[in-house]
Amino acid sequence: MLERIKAYILKLFPMGVFAKHVATLMTGTVVAGLIGVIVMPILTRIYKPEDFGIFALYASLLGILTVIVCWRYELAIVLPEKDEDAANLLWVCIIICLGMGLVAFLLVFLFRTVIADLVNSPQLASWLWFLPLSLIAAGFFRLLNYWSTRRKHFKRLAVRQMTQSSVTAITQIGAGFLYPSVNAGGLIGGSIAGHLVATGRLGWQIKKDEGSFIRNALNKFDLERVVKRYKNFPIFDVWSALLNAASTMLPALLLGVFFSPVVVGYYALGYQILSAPMTILGASIAQVFFPRANEAKRCGKLDQLTLQIFKQLLAIGFVPILLLTIVAPDLFALVFGARWFAAGEYVRWLSVWLLFVFISSPLSNIYTIMEKQREGLIVNTVMFVSRLTVLIIGGLKGDAFFTIAIYGMTGAALWIFNCIYMQYLAGVSLINIFTTLLKQFLHGVPYALLPIFTYFLTQNSLAFVLGGVGAGTIFLTVQMFRIRKHHEFA
């Protein structure tokens, strides 16, 4: 099965070594994603929306801290020409990560109750004790992740993804069945177990294969030199990343402040289901795109590679997102249970935003490659302030649905601009960008008509969902035919 998945991905991205690396990484992440999708209908029947809401609040706090846990020096591991410099950057990241774990412990010790009360979730306070441990595990994964990326050991990362997903799923389901009273703790505990086991396995593999080289490369003079050489990452990129992460994680936190964990739970499930498959693909391509784009810049071909990736990601994501937007509420009620209908309504307003987050995920490395961290900081500051403003406006209005709607529309507009601007930095012309967008829109409209016509003809929820599934099946069939035809004439 794994080889079949890898072969299919190779057909989607016929670009030689680049495709092989994407396929290797995605083989693991696709399997990991499938595990998450399969267990989700089970979890939504074991745990309540409130439990998912508390878990989302914990994950949001962790997500914001994780992007700055190494002060963004982990990104620089890919850049040096000499492996010795990269190894010293790895040591820099390890030191900073452990220090940030200590800082997180002090913050939890002093403010855990205040934080839990602020987001209307007193149950969260006791689980915040585990936040420093989660942060160190997540930080070590980030630095080991970029080291493996530099060394082009993508198989390690694929195995790590499958391990994390499997351990998380088994622990969450087991905790829910064996200890029903644990509530949100089952979801949080499963996530912690998955991170620890998977990151520990990745670290053991790197120590076994390259531990001696990394130890021998450690040099005080080189440590100081690489810290100064890549100082723009903590000076500029850390704030940009923090704002970007806060923009993504902020809704769960502010929905908790203004509403309740139940509303957070609806948002969290909708966001997770919508973003999970796109994160699998987008993160995998970003992992491989980073070093490939760095090479393309040196060869003067960054614009060609960037436009090619943009076209492929848009072609893959647009039609499925369009169909999901149409049938989401009925689909969520059918798959996850009637009490999750509202989560599907949220998805309708979040879909366009997350589509362009998916497309922009690999392209965001352009800010780093072009050393435009200052511009990236400005863009992310504007996005953060804008989305914070609309969330506060919606929260003060007291209408959760209205809040999600304006948040989704604002996010979509900002990420579309960001996607276009990053391509502009890479040298892609605006005409090529807008032509690609228009062609994809026209291509997607016919698929949307099938579920819409089905609904007007039957007025039946099940038939409506099946119409969307049918349109998606036709889309996948057409895509496979085009891929096969391309290879026949290549």
Image (spheres, rainbow, N blue to C red):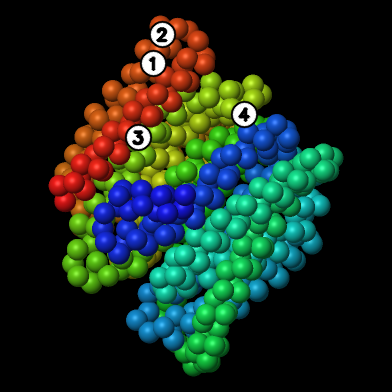
Q: Give the CA separation, mark 1 to mark 3.
A: 19 Å
Q: Is tag 1's residue or tag 3's residue first in the polypeptide sequence? A: 1
Q: Give the CA separation, mark 1 to mark 2.
A: 6 Å
Looking at the image, is 436 positioned above or below residue 28? above
Specify the amino acid type for callout 2. Answer: Phe
Q: Give the CA separation, mark 2 to mark 3.
A: 24 Å
Would you name the residue on which mark 1 appears?
452
Numbered label tally: 4
In the rendered structure, the answer to whether residue 319 lies left or right of residue 179 reads left
Specify the amino acid type for callout 1. Answer: Ile
State which quadrant residue 259 falls in: top right
Q: Is tag 4's residue or tag 1's residue first in the polypeptide sequence? A: 4
**Which of 155 and 273 lies nearest the eye of the viewer?**
155
Question: At which x and y percent is residue 439?
Answer: 21, 34
Residue contact between numbered discs 2 and 4, judged by CB atoms under 8 Å: no
**Which of 187 and 111 lies nearest the eye of the viewer?**
187
Q: Give the CA separation, mark 4 to mark 1.
A: 22 Å
Would you name the residue on which mark 3 appears?
476
In the rendered structure, the answer to whether residue 272 lies left or right of residue 82 reads right
Query: Callout 1: helix, strand or loop?
Result: helix
**Which of 232 and 124 lies nearest the eye of the viewer?**
124
Question: At which x and y percent is residue 52?
Answer: 68, 39
